[in-house]
Amino acid sequence: MDDVDTVIVGAGAVGLAVARALSESRECLVIDSEMAIGQGVSSRNSEVIHAGIYYPTASLKAELCVRGKALLYEYCQNRDIPHARCGKLIVATCPEEEATLHQLVLKAADNGVPDLSLLTGHEARALEPEVSASAALISPSTGIVSAHDYMLSLVADIERNGSLVSVGSRLVHAASTSGGYNLEIEVFDGSRFELKASNVVNAAGLGCQEVARSLAGFPDEQVPARYLCRGHYFSLQGPQPFKRLIYPVPPASGAGLGIHATIDLAGQVKFGPDTEYVEHEDYSVSLELKSAFAQAIQRYFPGLQADQLMPAYAGIRPKTQAPGSAPTDFIVRDEEPTGFPGWVNLFGIESPGLTASLAIGERVKQILDH
């Protein structure tokens, strides 16, 4: 049995950011059941650097998003990772929605995001002529990033620090032992090996609940329910209509931010995601959704023709928020009070997890260094 200081389960953006932070002062091993890094939630999102506008004040989502945004921009600049601080408009399409814009300004300021500006419809159209808006907010610190390049850079940092990333490696069973945890790991060819780790960080995304339950004796009531919430994306065929991201006023349901327009670093526009709770992982995108997408998008982009929309991809959020329930927060939990010192669970890390990833790494390092 080999020994390692810390095992991080999950090689998505969050797991890799955690490993980067920890590997600066300890030996780490990142494992992931997929055959490449970032194949789960991290490969199927909008690649947006969020400002920190929407989340409840004093929530982990608000705190770690704002901190993570600053860290991520600095990291991308220092490592020449493709990114753009392109900004976004949040548009009200009728006077009834304008009150929400004023509320968002106040919430953002409370969250440490004081740079939003209210625009008239005329001012919004001067910036984005294709947009239909009675009023809008501009968020200059919202941006986009190449998630893949970001994760490759994190892997390089981890390996430079003398730690390892092992794909095709799945945690099968864990048991608490003197000074840490005995881990049984199955690799891609079906063989297994054992490893002893002083600490374990569960950053397995959609698999977090399964990983927590693999720990012998871990109380089931401490594992929050997982809800799979699928979001579909459609790409736009034709000229690029926007220079910035375009978001509608967020819906009252709180399950998502509404079908919005994002641009990637190549200039391709895509729309999404919507929200659909599903029972199983299924990443298909039905053409039957095109009409509903077009109707939602045409409220703020009336020039859209439905036949310009082409199915792109779908992602699944690892929500702890049940359908119809109030939004839930990130869970970054030191399990020492539960009787499992050195084990950290990261449940419900959905959006803005990519933006918050470096800040989540900081937080986990603080937990394990205490």
Image (cartoon, grey):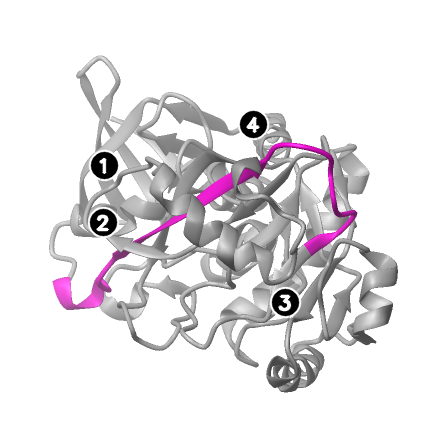
SS of the residue under disc 2 = loop
Residue 99 position in % (x across, y down): 64, 87
Q: Which residue is labeled 4 in the image?
A: 162
The tag earlier along the polypeptide, 1 or 3, is 3
Q: Amino acid at mark 1?
A: Leu
Q: Which residue is labeled 2 in the image?
A: 178
Residue 281 position in % (x across, y down): 25, 41
Whether residue 236 appears in magenta in the rendering, the answer is yes
| The N terminus: image quadrant | top left
The tag earlier along the polypeptide, 4 or 1, is 4
The tag earlier along the polypeptide, 3 or 4, is 3
SS of the residue under disc 1 = strand
Residue 183 is tagged as 1
Q: Which residue is labeled 3 in the image?
A: 52
Report whether residue 273 is seen: no
Q: Is residue 220 left or right of residue 358?
A: left
Within-10-Å neighbours for mark 4: few <14, some 14–19, many 20+: some
Residue stretch in magenta? 220-245
Marks 4,1: beta carbons within 8 A? no
The tag earlier along the polypeptide, 4 or 2, is 4
Residue 4 position in % (x across, y down): 38, 34
Marks 3,4: beta carbons within 8 A? no
